[in-house]
Image (cartoon, rainbow, N blue to C red):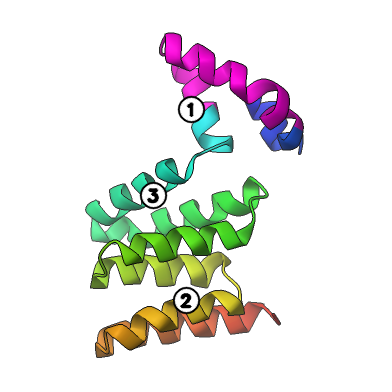
């Protein structure tokens, strides 16, 4: 039912009438199908941040694909794109590193807008590393190439 609601734009109804019952059932016992559907269509901010941590800890050769998939899910779920930027800002604020900045720049490059670039720029100003500047420029190019706003 959660998959159907997520896939066919009944998210508001599912959040109001279905999600509470699903979370109650998950608290009583583990259901892999239900937990997978809840995580896919109704992830909490904590779930999304932990997914970023898993991506960052993973193999570097998989960062691009995993980050694209993570960012694409915001579109698939019809999430507010501002949510993605806010989560990335929070994640970078917890401890800036070159790897975290790279993943954030990739995500913004894949699904962010021009307004999201200012968030990346703020972190770049606090850490004037040339490699981070190149990552920012790549993200800026991707965003400006596909969006007018």
User: What residue is rendered at 43% in x and 77% in y?
Assistant: 120
Q: CA distance from mark 2 to mark 1?
A: 31 Å
Instruction: Say what secondary structure mark 1 lies in.
Output: helix
Taking the magenta stretch, the answer to whether it contains residue 94 is no
| Viewer-side residue, 74 vs 93 | 93
> For the point 52% across and 15% down, which residue is it?
24
Q: Position of residue 140 (x, y in %)?
A: 50, 83
Identify the element where label 2 is drawn.
helix
Q: Residue 27 has which mark?
A: none
Q: Given contact means CB atoms under 8 Å apart, are the residues at marks 1 and 3 in contact? A: no
Q: Is residue 44 above or below residue 60?
A: above
Identify the mark at residue 119; answer none if there is no mark. Answer: 2
Tag in front: 1 or 3: 3
Residue 122: give x, y in percent of width and height: 41, 82
* The stretch drawn in magenta includes residue 22: yes
- Lower position in the chain sequence, tag 1 or tag 3: 1
Q: Is residue 121 visible?
A: yes
**Which quadrant holds the N terminus?**
top right
Q: Is residue 8 left or right of residue 31?
A: right
Residue drawn at the location 71% of the way across and 28% of the way down: 16
Numbered label attached to residue 49: 3
Q: In terms of depth relative to the viewer, which is nearer, 59 or 22? A: 22
Q: Provide the residue designation for mark 1.
A: 36
Magenta: predominant secondary structure element?
A: helix
The residues colored magenta run 13-37
Task: Count residues near mark 1 (Cα–Cα under 10 Å), then give few for <14, some for 14-19, many for 20+.
Answer: some
Q: Is residue 25 left or right of residue 57?
A: right
* Residue 1 visible at all: no
Dots 2, 3 in contact, CB < 8 A: no
């Amino acid at each position: 039912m959660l998959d159907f609601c997520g896939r066919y734009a009944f998210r508001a109804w599912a959040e109001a009438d279905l999600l509470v019952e699903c979370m109650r059932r998950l608290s009583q016992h583990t259901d892999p199908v239900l937990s997978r559907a809840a995580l896919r269509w109704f992830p909490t901010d904590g779930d999304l941040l932990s997914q970023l941590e898993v991506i960052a800890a993973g193999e570097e050769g998989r960062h691009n694909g995993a980050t694209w998939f993570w960012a694409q899910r915001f579109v698939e779920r019809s999430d507010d794109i501002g949510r993605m930027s806010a989560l990335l800002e929070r994640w970078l604020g917890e401890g800036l590193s070159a790897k975290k900045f790279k993943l954030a720049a990739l995500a913004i490059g894949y699904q962010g807008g021009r307004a999201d670039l200012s968030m990346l720029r703020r972190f770049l100003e606090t850490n004037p590393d040339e490699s981070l500047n190149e990552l920012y420029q790549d993200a800026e190019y991707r965003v400006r190439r596909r969006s007018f706003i």
